[in-house]
Structures are given as C-alpha cells and as structure tokens.
Image (spheres, rainbow, N blue to C red):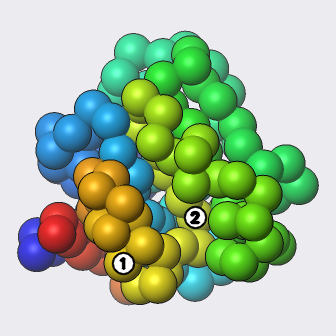
Amino acid sequence: MKKYILSLDDMDEVVSDVASHFQSGVVILRGDLASGKTTLVKKIVAHLGIDEDVTSPTFSLQHAYAEKVFHYDIYNHGLEHFMALGMLEELEREGLHFIEWGDDALVSLLREADINVMSVDIEKISDEKREYRVCTY
Ligand SMILES: Nc1ncnc2c1ncn2[C@@H]1O[C@H](COP(=O)(O)OP(=O)(O)OP(=O)(O)O)[C@@H](O)[C@H]1O
Ligand SMILES: [Mg+2]
C-alpha cells in the first residue's frame, strides 16, 4: 500500500502511480462524497493525453473517454444491479475502468474473474489536501 497526501495542483505522484500498474483493469475509487474521486479520474485521463471532459457518470451507466478509459459510478445503481446489467463483461474489455463507490465485494468478484484490480481510498484531510491510499492485490 502506498500513501500520499496531496493538494489539487500537486497530484502527479498519485496519478502516475495509478497509471503505471496496468493498462487494462479496474481501479476502485472509495471515499466520502466530494472526497475527490472524479477529480482523480480527470487527472489520469489528462495524464494519458486524452483531451476529453471528465464528468461524474451519476445518471448514466458508463462514460467512455477515447474508448480506452471507462468511468462508472455505482452509488445509484448498487453493486448487484450493476452486475445484473452485465457490467462484468464490460469490465473485461481492454482499457482502464474507474469505478466510483466500488467496495471489497467488488474487489473479490473481480479477482475471482481474473481481472486486474487496484483500489484508491481517498480521505479529506483539509479543504486543500486529500490522503490517497493506493492498494494493489
Ligand atoms: N487533492 C485534492 N486537494 C484538494 N481538493 C481536492 C483534491 N481533489 C479533489 N479536490 C476537490 O474536492 C471537490 C470534490 O471533488 P470530486 O467531485 O472529484 O469528488 P467526488 O469524490 O467525485 O464526489 P462524489 O462523491 O460527489 O462523486 C472538488 O472541489 C475538487 O476540486
Ligand atoms: Mg464523483
């Protein structure tokens, strides 16, 4: 596990760490409302040279950026509903898949399916700083 405490304009370390592990697989993003999950996806998409707007996929199942980064928010769907919609197959697609509000049950499920998985837990330290804990399995 790696830990970083970073401000908004200083997120390069966590961005390159997350982007360095695999090119295809799932990154689970955990953290309270407004901790910075969507912001991390935004910075990684920019780091990968993709010039597309990253917004929260609150009401849609998936946002795709350059057909190689995929972004989900399962807060409103719940894990069971999300899986019932056939999302496991989607997550096996080549590319980086970011899932806001994933949990340990999803980590286990992905590992059983032999899909690369890592998680980032984000915690608000102050208005200006967040703690990032990056775990690979
Ligand atoms: N490292 C950081 N340091 C300081 N502020 C940050 C950092 N990362 C994100 N923020 C700020 O936190 C706020 C919330 O960010 P964001 O929308 O990414 O959160 P979220 O976890 O996706 O929220 P939600 O749970 O609603 O999806 C934004 O104002 C953003 O600028
Ligand atoms: Mg968000």
Most foreground residue, 8 or 95: 95
Most foreground residue, 63 or 128: 63
Badge 1 density bin: few <14, some 14–19, many ≥20, Cα 10 Å: few
On-image quarter of the N terminus? bottom left
Determine the residue located farthest toward the right in the rendered image. Answer: 59
Q: Secondary structure at mark 1?
A: helix
Q: Is residue 76 left or right of residue 56?
A: right
Q: Which mark is residue 31?
A: none
C-alpha separation, residue under disc 1 versus residue under disc 2: 16 Å
Badge 2 density bin: few <14, some 14–19, many ≥20, Cα 10 Å: many
Q: Which mark is residue 108?
A: 1
Q: Position of residue 90 (x, y in %)?
A: 59, 42
Report the residue at 32% width, 53% height from top. Answer: 115
Q: Is residue 85 left or right of residue 87?
A: right
Residue position for label 2 = 100
The amino acid sitting under disc 1 is Ser
Q: Secondary structure at mark 2?
A: strand
Q: Is residue 87 above or below residue 104?
A: above
Q: Position of residue 87 (x, y in %)?
A: 65, 53
Q: Is residue 1 above or below residue 27?
A: below
Q: Is residue 101 above or below residue 42?
A: below
Report the residue at 28% width, 56% height from top. Answer: 114
Q: Is residue 76 left or right of residue 66?
A: right
Report the residue at 70% width, 53% height from top. Answer: 86
Q: Position of residue 101 (x, y in %)?
A: 58, 73
Of marks 1 and 2, the one in the foreground: 1
Q: Is residue 5 visible?
A: no
Asked if ligand 2 lies within 8 A of label 2, the reply is yes
